[in-house]
Amino acid sequence: MRRPRQLLCDEVHVWWASLDAPAWRIGQLTDMLTPDEVDRANRFGVDVEIVRTIADLEGIAEHFFSPRECASLRALGPHERTAGFFNCWTRKEAYIKATGLGLTQPLDTFDVELRPGAPALLLTIDGDPHLAAGWSLHDLDAPPAVTAALAMKGSARNLITYWLN
């Protein structure tokens, strides 16, 4: 087990564990977290999605995404749309989890950057970029065919990912 240490104010640790791992192994994760990591865990939202083909991708986007996001998705080439869709979905889900409002917050009331290769950004909240400036979004390193995002109030310049084997 590692020695607990204080996290830097701009440092975030993300721990990945397979849900197929034995329960005792996943339970060890809690023992490995520093008190500071446990405290900071309530301040974030994370979403992880398996990237897959969706038959009515644009229809789902029209129903849940903002008009700006739908236009961005339509502007992507056909080979980029699935990645753009999942970028948008995971970033939106991470944000509503971080706010604590969950799905009581309509997904079309804020805009995220969805273009593949573009930085993860919260662009506007209720049309206001100044409200969004207090938040940060981060793409997380994930296995192939998986998209993951983290949202947090404030910023983290030092995002560290750990894998629990």
Image (tube, grey):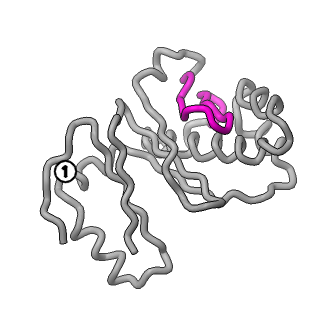
Q: Residue at x 23, y 62 (%)?
A: 33
Q: Residue at x 22, y 36 (%)?
A: 9
Q: Which residue is mark 1?
A: 36
- The residue lying toward the viewer, choosing from 48 and 43, is 48
Q: Where residue 39 appears, x then y in whole percent?
A: 23, 50
Q: Is residue 65 visible?
A: yes
The magenta segment is 107-125
Quarter of the picture containing the C terminus is: bottom left
111 up-or-down from 25: above or below: above
| Horizontal relation, residue 91 to residue 22: left or right | right
| Horizontal relation, residue 86 to residue 16: left or right | right
Q: Quadrant of residue 78?
A: top right
Q: Is residue 59 visible?
A: no
Q: Where residue 101 appears, x then y in whole percent?
A: 48, 41
Residue 110 highlighted magenta (yes or no): yes
Judge the density around disc 1: few (<14), some (14-19), many (≥20) Cα neighbours within 10 Å. few
Q: Secondary structure at mark 1?
A: helix
Q: Where residue 27 appears, x then y in whole percent?
A: 31, 76
Q: Where residue 117 appears, x then y in whole percent?
A: 63, 37
Q: Residue at x 44, y 46 (%)?
A: 45
| Horizontal relation, residue 53 to residue 38: left or right | right
Quarter of the picture containing the N terminus is: bottom left
How many labels, in total?
Answer: 1
| Horizontal relation, residue 13 to residue 50: left or right | left
Q: Residue at x 20, y 46 (%)?
A: 7
Residue 121 highlighted magenta (yes or no): yes
- The residue lying toward the viewer, choosing from 28 and 64, is 28
45 up-or-down from 20: above or below: above
Q: Quadrant of residue 103?
A: top right
Residue type indicated by callout 1: Asp
